[in-house]
Image (tube, grey):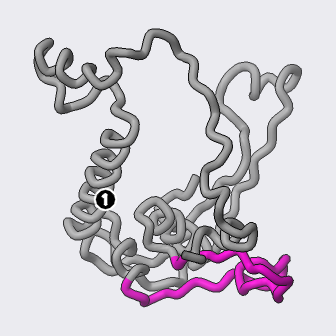
């Protein structure tokens, strides 16, 4: 949990009898607080945050929005990247990049518009591929009947697994994420 871009809680200590009584579930959590010395904007106003907490939150937001640079699986052994090194080497974060600035102020209209627009685009793609129910396009029973016509021939929840998807590509192309066309 990242709180106000200042505090990070990592772990699984739940607030319930089983976790807090001390004689049932054994759980642990770590609270990380760093002096808020990082200048940023929140709700359109200057704000002081923890550099680590805000970097973690921004990276997570960028992951959800598809704003992280693509990671390619190397075909040969290479040196680890800047975010793959053990402590005490700090993670690299590109503060000030266009993608970073898009997720800096999560209370801004621009961020909320980006978040909502990305969610709507992703939902539309998901609905085209998987045709889930419930679905906002189904407003009446007639809509429901029309929407479910595609699945009319399916009588059970059984399907075979595909075995030959992309099987005509060389192995190194499949491992590279399909970059070999």
Residue 162, compared with residue 179, is above or below; it is above
The residue that disc 1 covers is 118
Q: Which image quarter: residue 88?
A: bottom right
Residue 70 or 5: which is nearer the viewer?
A: 70
Q: Is residue 157 left or right of residue 174?
A: left
Residue 96 or 45: which is nearer the viewer?
A: 96
Q: Residue at x 86, y 83 (%)?
A: 77
State whether the magenta stretch is mostly helix, strand or loop. Answer: loop
Q: In what element is the residue under mark 1?
A: helix
Q: Is residue 171 left or right of residue 72?
A: right
- So how many labels did they put on this image? 1
Q: Is residue 121 left or right of residue 40?
A: left
Q: Residue at x 14, y 21 (%)?
A: 143
Q: Which image quarter: residue 78?
A: bottom right
Residue 27, compared with residue 7, is above or below; it is above
Residue 27: x %, y % from top left: 81, 36
Q: Residue at x 52, y 57 (%)?
A: 3
Crowd band around label 1 with a 10 angstrom C-alpha radius: few (<14), some (14–19), many (20+): some
Residue 149: x %, y % from top left: 25, 20
View extreme (front): residue: 168
Q: Quadrant of the C terminus?
A: bottom right
Residue bounds of the magenta highlight: 69-98
Q: Is residue 134 left or right of residue 23?
A: left
Residue 54: x %, y % from top left: 52, 72
Residue 89, compared with residue 146, is above or below; it is below
């Amino acid at each position: 949990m990242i709180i106000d871009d200042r505090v990070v809680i990592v772990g699984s200590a739940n607030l319930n009898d089983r976790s807090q009584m001390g004689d049932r579930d054994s759980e642990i959590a770590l609270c990380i607080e760093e002096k808020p010395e990082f200048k940023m904007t929140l709700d359109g106003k200057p704000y002081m945050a923890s550099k680590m907490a805000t970097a973690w939150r921004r990276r997570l937001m960028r992951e959800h929005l598809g704003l992280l640079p693509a990671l390619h699986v190397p075909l040969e052994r290479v040196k680890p990247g800047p975010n793959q090194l053990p402590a005490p080497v700090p993670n690299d974060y590109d503060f000030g990049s266009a993608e970073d600035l898009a997720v800096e102020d999560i209370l801004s209209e621009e961020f909320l518009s980006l978040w909502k627009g990305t969610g709507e685009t992703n939902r539309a793609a998901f609905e085209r591929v998987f045709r889930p129910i419930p679905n906002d396009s189904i407003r009446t029973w007639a809509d429901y009947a029309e929407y479910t016509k595609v699945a009319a021939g399916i009588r059970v929840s059984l399907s075979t697994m595909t075995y030959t998807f992309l099987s005509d590509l060389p192995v190194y192309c499949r491992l590279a994420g399909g970059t070999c066309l």
